[in-house]
Image (cartoon, helix red, strand yellow):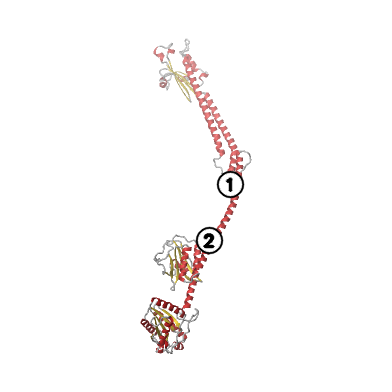
Amino acid sequence: MALGSETIGRKLLWSIALPGLVVALLGVGHFSREARQAVREGTHLEALALAEAVANTFLLPQVPGAAPHGAVAEVLSSDTRLFRSVEDVRILTPDGRIRWSRRPAEQGHPHPEAARLSATGPETARSSDHGTEVVRPLGGPECSGCHTGQAAQRMGVLQVRLGEPALHRQLQTVFQDALGAMVLFVGILGLVTWLSLRFVLTAPLKRLSEAMGRAADGDLLVRAESRGTDEISRLGAAFNQMLARLTSMKVEEIDTHRDLQLVKEKLALKDELEERLTELSLLFDVARSLNTTLELDELLSRITRLVVERLHIPDFSIMLLNEEGMLEVKHAWPQGRGLEGHTFAMGEGACGRAAQSRKAVYLPDLTDPTSIFARRGLRGGSEHGTLLAVPMVHADTLLGVINFQRPETASISAEEIELFTAVADQAATAVTNARLHAETVKLTLTDALTGVPNRRHLFQRMDLELARAQRFGVPLALLMVDVDHFKRLNDLAGHRAGDETLRRVSEVLRTRARKVDTLGRYGGEEFVLLLPQVSKATAVEVAETLRRAVADAVTLSRPGLPGGHVTVSIGVAHFPTDATSQDTLVDCADSALYCSKRTGRNRVTAFEPGMEVHPGRERSISTPPADPPATPPTPPGIAKA
């Protein structure tokens, strides 16, 4: 600690010198006052004695022939040592005139203070620093020898005034010299004491304090001066020992801190590794769970369940890009809020911006005006909390957006954003696989030329519809449609025109069929249409409607066909009126179709018993072939008749 202006040496100096100076001054003052009092008392007694002596002079016997009281005049005019300190000796007559005085010029003149002196009663004496005055009335019994009557009682007033005695002045000079010597002594003593304290106490303490100050600032290598055997030296030695111990403790602390830092870094790496392992385990579970199904709806349901349960996301939605280029909500959690089916345009809201930029959009506070998440009034949608919209992109193809939301603001960390992005990538891969699977299944069950179910899918649907009809006792109609003169069409216009004709015919049939109906390509230019819960008469009416629609809608740019346009022939069979099994039902419809072709084409024929045994008809195959998924459709141009 650095010494300030109030050092220990100065404090000790003041504690020694100041009391000594005060005591000396008080002693000198006391003795001066006592001496002055003694001188004053001595002067007082001297003045009384002198007044007594002058008054007794009046009692001396008179010399014959001499002036009255001549002895008084002689005594007053004498130069004895008794009168050396006397300033004035006056004898006043009763009328206030000066009768005798040491100053002859005053004799006979009135005294200026005659009234005060005459008014004085008995003998009085007053002493001050300037002298002593004695006033004594003259007269009384001692004057009755010379004076008689009333006049002897009041003969006058004696005034004796003594100035400051020389002894008093000498004493003052002595005391002044003593006081100066005392002050000089005290000054010399203070200087000697200050020098002694400075070199013996203050300087060592200052060096010790500076060393302590440097140690307090962190310099543990500093050492205090410890030479000598006095208390300050022993204190410096103890301080040095303390610093040595502190230095050793500091070294140990540094080593311990370094070890703790290494341990902390290892623990941090361990925690990070465990966190990464947890994330990898989660991603593995997500990938394994998502890859166990190829059904898109089941896949989206699993994604929703995994996100809610494993990632602790209470508000979640997954959007897919539909055919119109809009983001459509496919699955959402919590369920039952009616969010499924709502759409967002590209750039609309956080999900639209994420899809447009193909980057994650993070909104830490949805109540912030600068972070608006446009919901357009979706029921159940939360307007507060934290939102993260992550696009699902696979092979540079945007599939959709996943929205993660929590009710607390800024509740999604940077690590979680990275994890959610990885989950979105896994989901994008799974959605792509599901769509590829759906496309593959569609290709195996759909005719590549017309887009309607192929023969395999057609017979699968026929099995289901017949089983349903048999179980519930409802009717089922089967229409077999054949394009008329298709071989001639291919010969006249080419196979490309034939393919286009088949597509247009299938389009006319599909657009006029019900949603519950099943249209499929049976083979070549033949189509089959299943009509559940339809009577035979109604089925004939539907077939007639389809025939006219094809004749009106499908035309050719090149002439050559009868009537100049494309027509179809239709055979109608009915369950359970005409047949009770699939093979029989197909054979009945084929028999009716053969009848329509044989009787002029461009007509509808309902099955009648006996048609199936016509000698010119080629019997249809009773069971459908097991076509592999990649089997191409039957080439156009193969006509049955």
**In the rendered image, the vertical position of residue 4 relative to residue 595, given as above or below:** above
Question: Is residue 237 in view from this perspective?
Answer: yes
What residue sits 51% from the left and 66% below the top?
285
Q: Residue at x 43, y 78 (%)?
A: 463
Q: Which residue is mark 2?
A: 275
x and y, in percent, of residue 268 in the image = 55, 58
Asked if labels 2 and 1 touch by Cβ distance under 8 angstroms, the answer is no
Given the image, on which type of amino acid does mark 1 rest?
Ala
32 to the left or right of 154: right
Q: What secondary structure is marked by label 2?
A: helix
The kind of residue tagged 2 is Glu
* Residue where numbered disc 1 is placed: 215
Q: How dense is the environment of label 1, judged by Cα within 10 Å: few (below 14), some, or many (20 and up)?
A: some
Q: Is residue 106 above or below residue 634?
A: above
Observer-nearest residue: 631 or 462? 462
Q: Where in the figure is residue 64, as x and y percent of width and height? A: 47, 9
Q: Position of residue 231 (x, y in %)?
A: 60, 39
